[in-house]
Amino acid sequence: MYVLSLAVRFATLCTLLWLAAVDVHARRLPNPAVLLIGAMFFADAWIEQLPVHDVLTHIGVAVLAYAVCAVLYALRMMGGGDAKLASVIFLWSGSVLWLPSLMLVSMVGLLVALLSLATRSISTQHTSPPMRALALFSGERGVPYGVALALGGGAVIVLAGLLPLSLPR
């Protein structure tokens, strides 16, 4: 069962990385992919035979995260797709890993925001392919915070699954 759980977590990471690329390019996070990440949590919980109480705790953390993100969305400080993705990331994190997730997402988010500020004057019509790629992060189009959520949240999801490998038997 452990290998199957790890496979679900890596599939989740792949989906998150795809979402990060979509967010950089289109500044959109497709709902079906976000829902898939949430569904993969429930698949993993079933594989791991997580007790119902623990699943409900994870759901509670996700609802709380969504409420906070909804306020940020109402204040125009966060996009709607980012709010939904954040709640799904915190669904995976639960009450044990919510703080490490928040810290990692925040650190990656700071880097993404700085990159967006640094590239705001670069044109997507630039002749150099690396410069055109950097221009995709331009803050003129908004900050692609889905990248921070995907990288930070994905790291926590996968690392939590790999942790049992490092523990003595």
Image (cartoon, grey):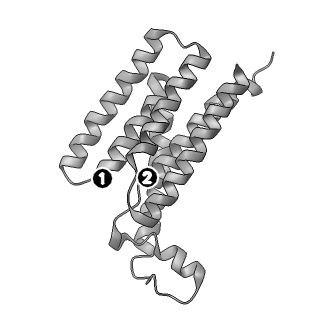
Residue depicted at 41% across the width and 55% down the height: 145
Q: Secondary structure at mark 2?
A: helix
Choose the circle earlier in sequence order: 2 or 1.
Answer: 1
Residue 19 in percent (x, y) is at: 49, 52
User: Is 144 above or below relative to 82?
Assistant: below
Judge left or right: residue 130 versus residue 113: right
Q: Residue furthest right?
A: 169
Residue 120 in percent (x, y) is at: 39, 76
Amino acid type, callout 2: Gly
Residue highlighted by disc 2: 146
Looking at the figure, which quarter contains the N terminus?
Answer: top right
Amino acid type, callout 1: Gly
Residue depicted at 47% across the width and 59% down the height: 22
User: Is 126 above or below relative to 13?
Assistant: below
Q: Nearer the viewer, residue 103 or 165?
A: 165
Q: Secondary structure at mark 1?
A: loop
Residue depicted at 43% across the width and 84% down the height: 123
User: Do the residues bearing badges 2 and 1 touch, measured as CB atoms within 8 Å?
Assistant: yes
User: Is 57 above or below relative to 116?
Assistant: above
Residue 167 in percent (x, y) is at: 75, 22
Residue 17 in percent (x, y) is at: 56, 51
Q: Residue 79 shows which numbered tag? A: 1
| Res. 113 image quadrant | bottom left
Give the class, few, some or many, for how many residues have Cα within 10 Å of label 2's Cα (few <14, many ≥20): many
Mark 2 to mark 1 CA distance (whole Å): 9 Å
* Res 126 visible: yes
